[in-house]
């Protein structure tokens, strides 16, 4: 596969000297490669030229909106579903949570989400799909995932999850906004020495959807206190109903990550899910 990456680089950057190509990892939809420690190439498992072009246009729009750095496209190859970006500085937040000062993340995250969620949905509709997944269906999916992995959950914590799975899902949102839609700690880059956010990456799942989805992963990965502090820097109101959906989505996402990390995905997804289970499911 690295030979294919080298061929793409030769085609699009003929004068660029390739010294190293390293596969960094993969997700459900993509593989990621690092070139010369300065470029990142994201290659789709299944090429979709239209989706590739849409993501390039979306990133250009996001760069205009975002107060935080986002990837800059160097080239795109629609035939293979590849996009090359300049590598941003910093480490994924999920790698360096120990010793970090998470309270310093709240203001930039709140300001960032204000800017992104403030984009006119009609304008962004051509750049991001509509993503509306009913809460009852999410809850059903979460229960199916949990039944596959419940024996991995520490026994004292199982009642927390069981109670959630038997509760009623929240009402649907009254309005939708442009969202990152996958704002987990792995997609937030941070300077470990200063706790400064240096970038927001992976905009593949960006969509017109419920803004509570973006807050849900902050709640799951950083905890309710940082979620509450982030809201103090967010310019839109979150009603009690909105906050209920934040917690609901956070719990569904944690169960999904637990199942993914224990089956086909990297184990660190499951480890993080188990580590964050108590605060995500606490009353």
Image (tube, grey):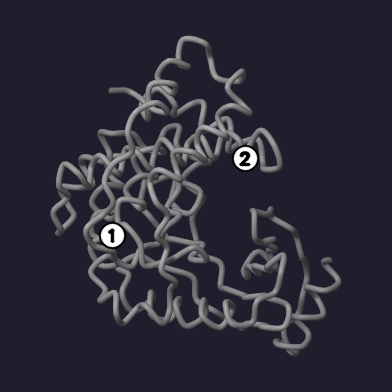
Q: Nearer the viewer, mark 2 or mark 1?
A: 2
Question: Which residue is nearer to you in this view: 257 or 222?
Answer: 257
Residue at 57%, 34% (x, y): give it. Answer: 144
Picture layout, residue 206 above or below residue 140: below
* Quadrant of the image occupied by residue 260: top right
Residue 91 position, x and y percent, is: 51, 51
Q: Residue furthest top?
A: 156
Q: Is residue 282 left or right of residue 90?
A: left
Tell me which residue sits at (70%, 68%) in the image: 35
The local crowd at label 1, few if under 14, some if 14 to 19, many if 20 or more residues have their Cα within 10 Å, is many
Q: Position of residue 93 (x, y in %)?
A: 46, 45
The residue pinned by badge 1 equals 113
Task: Look at the picture and state if 105 lies above or below 66.
Answer: above
Disc on the earlier residue, 2 or 1: 1
Q: Residue at (29%, 79%) from the top-left corner?
A: 122
- Residue at the (52%, 66%) spot, across then down: 204
Q: How many marks?
A: 2
Would residue 247 appear left or right of 59 to someone viewing this image? left
Residue pointed to by mark 2: 260
Q: Quadrant of the N terminus?
A: bottom right
């Amino acid at each position: 596969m690295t030979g294919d990456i080298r061929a793409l680089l030769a085609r699009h950057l003929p004068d660029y000297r390739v010294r190293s190509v390293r596969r960094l990892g993969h997700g459900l939809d993509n593989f990621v490669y690092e070139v010369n420690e300065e470029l990142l190439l994201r290659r789709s498992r299944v090429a979709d030229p239209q989706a590739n072009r849409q993501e390039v246009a979306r990133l250009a729009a996001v760069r205009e909106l975002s107060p935080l750095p986002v990837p800059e496209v160097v080239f795109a190859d629609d035939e293979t579903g590849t996009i090359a970006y300049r590598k941003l500085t910093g480490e994924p937040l999920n790698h360096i949570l120990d010793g970090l000062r998470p309270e310093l993340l709240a203001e930039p995250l709140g300001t960032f989400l204000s800017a992104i969620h403030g984009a006119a949905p009609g304008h962004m509709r051509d750049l991001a799909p509509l993503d509306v997944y009913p809460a009852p269906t999410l809850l059903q999916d979460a229960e199916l995932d949990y039944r596959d992995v419940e024996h991995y959950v520490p026994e004292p914590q199982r009642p927390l999850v069981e109670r959630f799975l038997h509760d009623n899902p929240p009402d649907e949102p009254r309005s939708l906004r442009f969202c990152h839609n996958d704002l987990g700690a792995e997609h937030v880059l941070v300077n470990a020495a200063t706790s400064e956010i240096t970038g927001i990456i992976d905009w593949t799942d960006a969509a017109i959807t419920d803004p509570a989805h973006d807050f849900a992963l902050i709640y799951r990965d950083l905890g309710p206190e940082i979620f509450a502090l982030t809201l103090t820097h967010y310019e839109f109101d979150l009603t009690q109903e909105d906050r209920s959906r934040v917690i609901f989505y956070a719990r569904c996402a944690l169960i999904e990550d637990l199942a993914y990390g224990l089956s086909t995905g990297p184990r660190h997804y499951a480890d993080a899910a188990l580590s964050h289970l108590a605060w995500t499911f606490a009353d």
